[in-house]
Amino acid sequence: AFDVLVVGGGPAGASAAIYAARKGIRTGIVAERFGGQVNDTLAIENFISVKETEGPKLVAALEEHVKTYDVDIMPLQRAVGLAEPSKTDSKHAGLIEVKLESGAILRSKSVILATGARWRNLNVPGEEAYKNKGVAYCPHCDGPLFKGKHVAVIGGGNSGVEAAIDLAGVVGHVTLLQFDTELKADAVLQRKLRSLENVTILTSAQTTEITGDGTRVNGLTYTDRVSGESKHIALEGVFIQIGLVPNSDWLKGTLDLSKYGEIEINHHNATSLPGVFAAGDVTTIPYKQIIIAMGEGSNAALGAFDYLIRQ
Ligand code: FAD
C-alpha cells in the first residue's frame, strides 16, 4: 500500500508526487496521460522564471523531475472509483481504495486527486484543425499573442464576457458571439463590456465554422438565428469560452463537489473525505493555470503529509 497515491499526472499531480516523495514516504502516481492539458499547449509564456517554452517540452521536464524520486509511476491507467477504508476488511484497515478501469485496486493511506479539467469544444469544422493556430481557450495564456488583432470570443456567460473584457485591453477588436438571445453573464460584467469601444456583441449567433488559410485562422462563419442568414467575419483568433469541465464524473456521490462538479477543498487542499486531498483544475480554485496547479499540488502533498503524521 502507498502512503500517498496521486491520481492524475498533470502539473498538479506531478508537483504533489515530488513533494510527497521528498518526505521519504511511499508515493505512487496513476495517470491516464502524463502531462495532462500541457501536452496540448504550444507556446507557454507565463510559467514564471521560464520566459518561453512549449507544452511537450514542459511535460518532458515534469516527467524527468518526477523520475529523480522514488515514485511508482503507473501511466495509461484510468481511475474509475474511490472508496473509503473498508470497515469489515481488517487486512486493509485504514486504507483508501482507488479502483482502476483495468479492474485493479490500489490502496493508500492518503489520496491526492488531480484529474484536471477539459475545455468544452464547440465541435464545428475548423476548430480541431486550427487549435493553437488561432483557436484558443485561455485568454490569460494566449491573449498577448493576438496583440492589435481582431479576435472573436464565443460564449456569453461569465467566462466569455470576462474573456472579452480582458482581451479588449490587449487585442485590436473583439467580437463576442452568443448563441442565445441575450448574454448570461453577471450584470456588472455586461455593463463593463458594453462600455468598451472596441467590442462588438452579436446575440442569436450560432458559429458554424472556423475558417483558415490552411496554416492559420482567417475568420469565422455564423448563422444569424433571427434572419437565418449565414455570415462571415474576417479575424485572426477565436477564443472558445463555453465551459471548463472538471474530470470528476467518477467521483460523484463519494465526496463533496460544487454545482459545477469541482471538488470542494479547504486551505490544506483537504476534501470532504478524511485522507483524500485534491489539487489543480479539478478543484474549486478559481483560476486554472499551470503555475497555480503546481502550487496547489505541493500544498495538497503537504496537507496529506500533515494528515499522515497525525494518524
Ligand atoms: P491537467 O493538466 O488537466 O491533468 C490532469 C491529469 O489527470 C492528466 O494526467 C490526465 O490524464 C489525468 N486524469 C484525468 N482523469 C483521470 C482518471 N479518471 N484516472 C487517471 N488519470 C486521470 N496554463 C498556463 O498557465 N499557461 C498556458 O499557456 C496555458 N495554455 C493552455 C493551452 C491549452 C490549449 C489548454 C487546454 C490549457 C492551457 N493552460 C495553460 C491551462 C493548464 O494547462 C492547466 O491549468 C493545467 O494543466 C492544470 O493542471 P492539472 O494538473 O490540474 O490538470
Image: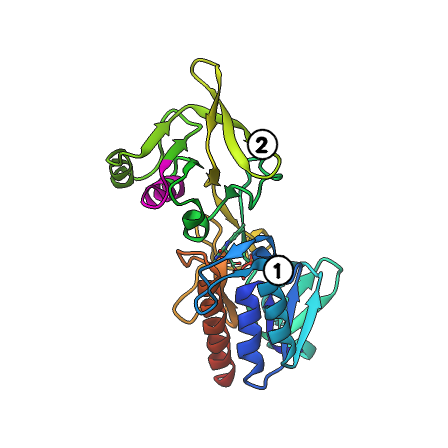
In the displayed structure, 244 sits above or below 295; it is: above
Residue 219 in the image: state x and y as whole percent. 50, 30
In magenta, the rendered stretch is 158-173
Left or right of 51: which side holds 113? right
In front of the other: 46 or 187:
46
Label 1, ligand 1: CB separation under 8 Å: no
The circle drawn on residue 56 is 1
SS assignment for the magenta stretch, majority:
helix
Left or right of 54: which side holds 71? right
In front of the other: 29 or 41:
41
User: Residue at position x 48%, y 25% from top?
Assistant: 206
User: Residue at position x 62%, y 39% from top?
Assistant: 129
- Number of numbered discs visible in the structure rendering: 2
Between label 2 and label 1, give the one nearer the viewer. Answer: 1
What is the crowding at mark 1: few (fewer than 14 residues within 10 Å), some, or many (at least 20)? some
The circle drawn on residue 259 is none
User: Residue at position x 49%, y 64% from top?
Assistant: 279
Please tell me whether mark 1 sits on a helix, a strand or a loop. helix
Residue 299 in the image: state x and y as whole percent. 45, 73
Q: Is residue 288 visible?
A: yes
Provide the residue designation for mark 2.
124
Label 2, ligand 1: CB separation under 8 Å: no
Left or right of 141: which side holds 169? left
Q: Amino acid at mark 2?
A: Val
In the displayed structure, 69 sits above or below 60; it is: below
Q: Is residue 169 magenta?
A: yes
Q: Earlier in the sequence, mark 2 or mark 1?
A: 1
In the picture, residue 82 is in which quadrant? bottom right
